[in-house]
Image: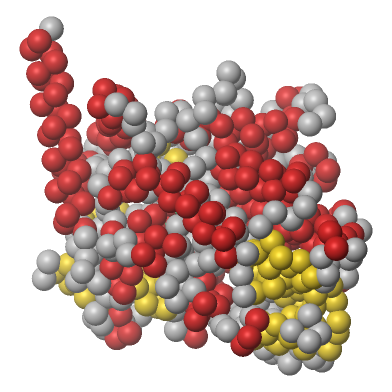
């Protein structure tokens, strides 16, 4: 027995050491500065016809919403349900959909079960065709939401907001756009996306590449041939590189592997890839679901992936199995700390074992094994990704944590070896923790002419991540001091409901401006720090990623820009408690209904 305990302790110590060594290989002194923006050419929207133009619009409205993804659409739908129909949605893309408009890469699908991911299924009566919906289906669903709730007539597509300024005399936001519009609104909602600003790795020489290159969120089917559902036949004589092994690459690689002459997958950190088990929707089951089933299932899923361990696991998939125990929480004793670490190791050992079971070449299999803790990065689920590495035309180029050394006119260089390619596909992700104004592409100017970039220069100031002092009637849906969750659609549903409630409550009470008090914001910050302690310790030992701002040292500014790392249900509870209080706690109002 003692021998067994000793062997177990030694195994845990060895894993701990391995995780630490793998992390240290990846920490880069440049931190977030290792990324660069897409050039105008690479950022161009490939899904619209060039040459669109329209007359500029000058109008007064109650609400301007920036963003036509789920966050903007759900805000609008909730406003309409509350009887507020004079709103405008400004969206840079050519249609609704947000993430699901831009990401049309082959194999793109949602890794969260469609029955809990797609909002308002009971209201629209829509039945997803499969357990995990394809991006094509989700984009079409967004269009259906737009039609069902009459949002198209209120949307300005292919339009960027270029500026927004609070006019204190008129108590309105003045919003200008790239199409010359001048929109004056009582409320201004920033629902501009969480993962919408694509980024490229700042690899030396990246601009010198002479072949074709694009980011996964700007897929060029003219070049590759095919479509999200048809094979990319133009690749049959091409040597293709995929840079990245995150959630996007895991979905892209098997599709490119099908037709490319040769595919080189450049890996910096191995992804964790569990079993997917995709299947068609059981129509009889779906039709038998009782009223109220979706809200119940959504909450049940979030409970299951945040360690709340509901009595029944309704979704019961790879996510709920992997996340059933919240191993990032602050342990209450040394025994509990050891137990949590052991559970975390076991989940990841299962993932590593799967690599050995699937990938035939043992050397390749070893390189594909992730040595990081389960909350450090988003775990992926796929039944073809690892299998691709058994194909003769697919080559793993493992960079041992360093990344690609350089790009030349002909291809990519790692360890002094040049890999000539015709096409580079950057599956290199999106900006998540950079400054909000940078991601938005404009810098809102609030009370007394203060810009968001100035006010938040030393970190964010918000109440719940939704309202911000110095910015009257500005309402935010973002991760900055807001919630977080595996099921982003659940998070967005809660936030959009809250935002629409605030607008409707102000209208009802005759309030023309609202602005949170600084004391209330500091209280919220304290709550963020309080719930963040357990996670902060966990994330310090994580491999770098956007979850921990690439392991940059946490200064006071970064500490203010936290997301709420407690359960999404607890975050939603804070919002609900604020709404239920009924008297706008922590917020200054004009005119104040209490004085009437
Ligand atoms: P990620 O940021 O997760 O991945 C980027 C990849 O690029 C990483 O593997 C990264 O390596 C790699 N990389 C960066 N720089 C270099 C370099 N210099 N050399 C080699 N490799 C490099 O982006 P994704 O687009 O994959 O995913 C982003 C998010 O989008 C996910 O976390 C998820 O939230 C969402 N998503 C969701 C999906 C869903 O189904 N719901 C599907 C797809 C994406 P390293 O890991 O070392 O940084």
Which of the 4 image quarters holds residue 14? top left
Relative to 577, is 320 on the left or the right?
left
Quarter of the rendering containing residue 352: top left
Residue sitting farthest toward the top: 1
- Placement of the C terminus among the 4 image quadrants: bottom right
Q: Is residue 14 above or below residue 454?
A: above
Quadrant where the N terminus is found in the figure: top left
Q: Nearer the viewer, residue 154 or 267?
A: 154
Asked whether residue 133 appears in the rendered view, the answer is: no
Q: Residue 195 in the image: x percent, y percent? A: 52, 63
Q: Position of residue 441 (x, y in %)?
A: 55, 80
Q: Position of residue 71 (x, y in %)?
A: 67, 59
Image position of 15 with respect to 509: above or below: above
Residue 90, compared with residue 194, is above or below; it is: below
Q: How many marks?
A: 0
Q: Residue at x 72, y 35 (%)?
A: 295
- The figure's colour scheme reads secondary structure
Residue closest to the eye, 473 or 303 = 473
Q: Horizontally, is 65 left or right of 57 in the view?
A: left
User: In the rendered view, does 430 fall on the left or right side of 140?
Assistant: left
Q: Is residue 313 left or right of residue 205?
A: right
């Amino acid at each position: 027995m003692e021998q067994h305990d000793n062997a177990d302790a030694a195994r845990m110590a060895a894993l701990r050491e391995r995780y630490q060594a793998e992390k240290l290989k990846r920490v880069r002194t440049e931190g977030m500065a290792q990324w660069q923006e897409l050039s105008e050419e690479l950022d161009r929207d490939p899904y619209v016809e060039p040459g669109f133009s329209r007359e500029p619009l000058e109008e007064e409205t109650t609400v301007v919403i920036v963003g036509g993804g789920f966050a903007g659409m759900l805000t609008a739908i909730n406003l309409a349900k509350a009887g507020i129909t004079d709103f405008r949605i400004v969206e840079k893309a050519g249609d609704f959909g947000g993430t699901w408009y831009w990401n049309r890469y082959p194999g793109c699908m949602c890794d969260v079960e469609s029955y809990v991911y797609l909002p308002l299924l009971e209201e629209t009566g829509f039945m997803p065709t499969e357990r995990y919906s394809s991006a094509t289906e989700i984009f079409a669903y967004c269009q259906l939401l737009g039609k069902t709730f009459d949002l198209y007539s209120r949307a300005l597509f292919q339009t960027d907001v270029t500026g927004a300024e609070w006019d204190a005399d008129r108590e309105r936001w003045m919003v200008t756009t790239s199409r010359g519009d001048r929109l004056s609104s009582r409320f201004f909602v920033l629902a501009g996306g969480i993962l919408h600003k694509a980024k490229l790795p700042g690899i030396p020489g990246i601009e010198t590449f002479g072949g074709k290159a694009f980011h996964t969120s700007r897929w060029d089917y003219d070049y590759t041939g095919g479509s999200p559902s048809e094979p990319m036949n133009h690749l049959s004589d091409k040597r293709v590189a995929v840079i990245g092994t995150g959630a996007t690459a895991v979905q892209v690689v098997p599709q490119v592997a099908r037709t490319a002459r040769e595919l080189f997958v450049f890996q910096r950190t191995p992804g964790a890839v569990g079993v997917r088990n995709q299947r068609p929707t059981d129509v009889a089951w779906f039709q038998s679901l009782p009223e109220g089933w979706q809200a119940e299932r959504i909450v049940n899923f979030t409970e299951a992936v945040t360690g709340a361990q509901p009595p029944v696991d309704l979704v019961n998939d790879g996510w709920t199995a992997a996340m059933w125990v919240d191993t990032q929480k602050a342990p209450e004793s040394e025994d509990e700390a050891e137990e949590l670490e052991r559970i975390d190791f076991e989940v990841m050992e299962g993932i590593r074992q799967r690599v050995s079971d699937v990938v035939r070449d043992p050397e390749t299999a070893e390189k594909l094994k992730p040595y990081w803790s389960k909350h450090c990065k988003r775990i992926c689920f796929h039944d073809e990704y690892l299998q691709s590495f058994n194909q003769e035309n697919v080559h793993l180029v493992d960079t041992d944590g360093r990344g690609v050394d350089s790009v030349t006119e002909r291809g990519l260089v790692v360890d002094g070896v040049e890999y000539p390619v015709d096409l580079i596909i950057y599956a290199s992700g999106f900006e998540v923790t950079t400054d909000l104004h940078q991601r938005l592409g404009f810098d809102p100017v609030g009370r007394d002419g203060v810009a968001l970039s100035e006010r938040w220069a030393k970190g964010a100031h918000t109440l719940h991540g939704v309202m911000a002092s110095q910015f009257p009637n500005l309402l935010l849906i973002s991760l900055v001091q807001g919630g977080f969750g595996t099921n982003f659609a659940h998070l967005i549903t809660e936030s959009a409901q809250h935002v629409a409630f605030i607008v409707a409550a102000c209208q009802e009470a005759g309030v023309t401006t609202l602005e949170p008090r600084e004391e209330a914001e500091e209280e919220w910050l304290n709550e963020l720090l309080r719930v963040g302690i357990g996670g902060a310790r966990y994330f310090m030992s994580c491999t770098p990623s956007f979850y921990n701002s690439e392991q940059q040292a946490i200064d006071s500014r970064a500490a203010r820009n936290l997301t709420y790392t407690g359960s999404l249900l607890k975050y939603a509870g804070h919002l609900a408690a604020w709404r239920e209080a009924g008297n706008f706690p922590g917020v200054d109002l004009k005119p104040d209904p209490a004085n009437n």
